[in-house]
Image (cartoon, helix red, strand yellow):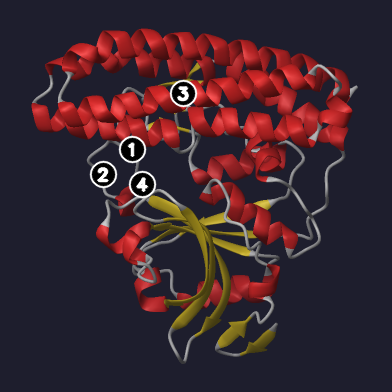
Amino acid sequence: METRQDSVVDYGAEEVANALPGKHCVYSSLRTSLRRYGVNMAESELFMLCGSMCAEYGGDLKRFGPEKYPEQLQEMAASGGPVIRVEPWVAGVSDETNLLQVLTSGYGTMLHTSSTALTYHDVYVKNYPRGHVIELCGLDLQERTAQVNDSFLLDSSGHAMTYVGSARLDDLMQGIIEYAWLVEQPAPLSPSEMHAACAHHIRQYLTGHEAIWRGVPTSNESESQTGKAVTGKQVKRGDEGYRAFVGDFHLLADMEDQDFRTYCHEIYYNLRLGSALHLTDYTADYCLLHQATLGPQTQHVIELAQALYADWHKLNLHIYKTGLQLRKHRMPEITERALHLIERQRHMLEELMILAEKAAE
């Protein structure tokens, strides 16, 4: 890495970045950042450490998924994982010098941004704005460019790719929500430590609770306002969160046609990214990775997870098509199918928790 007063350029970024795209921007950016410092952790392990299986629902059908980005990173540190500091990007106050300081003093930097600021690819510019996490690898303030690693770039067909290259710094700074960096040299976890954290978060998922959330943004807030959330809302997590989310599907039946389409699309998006499909996929990955320490019964959990993933995928496509076709009468059947999958999901996680607790002893 070369450092000048006005730039930090990591010439090894392209070599270090995994050529294969990740499955989710949060965990793939963490994975590639940790690899720079000799810690090889799988996305599925990071998903478990962050407690991200405990999707949250606060009554807005457009919002269902894991905790906010900073809280997921706090959960990871509390679970024995890498310690990462997160700072909000304050418009008119934060600037490129903050990023330069972090790059020169930290152990890897990530940006939580609005996708509209990622002008290095048309798919971000032309589509609905979403939150996205990328790795910041370098800055050149004279050229006004940033070097980034985007390890989960979904094209218009849904195909995941990677992008390692330059981004326009001024565009990027228009969309930063938070920036995060490793505050110390990360250390690997032992299998028993991983399993203890996994079992802990599964128990959180299974028990569930109503909590006064730090702030749940409403659906009409822009991406840049996600840090200014309304506080005091009742939120359900984990199994209870899934059941409350699906239980509100009946509200779609009385919506205007365009609203019905929009909500079905958002439900499809939220189940696909961050909740049901990632939960089942990462569960299978985690079990495959740790089969030796979890024991022979792990194969059964893998089969449960893979079958559940396939069935969530089918139902999710059905939800998407239902929205396009305005088939509002399908919602009771969709609700019933989803609740059945949630029950299977609970059973799968109960089995994994038993294995993880035993392996952690």
Look at the picture and state if 19 lies above or below 276.
below
Q: Residues within 10 Å of mark 4 (few under 14, many from 20)?
A: some
Judge depth for marks 4 and 3 and give the one in front. Answer: 3
Q: Are marks 1 and 4 in contact (CB under 8 Å)?
A: yes
Give, as a three-letter code, the residue at label 2.
Glu
Mark 1 or mark 3, which has the lower sequence index?
1
Mark 4 or mark 3, which has the lower sequence index?
4
Quadrant of image for the C terminus:
top right
Dot 4 corresponds to which residue?
A: 226
Residue 217's mark? 1
Image x and y of residue 282, in percent: 62, 34
Give, as a three-letter code, the residue at label 1.
Pro
Judge depth for marks 3 and 2 and give the one in front. Answer: 3
Secondary structure beneath dot 1 equals: loop
Mark 1 or mark 4, which has the lower sequence index?
1
Residue 314's mark? none
Residue 312's mark? 3
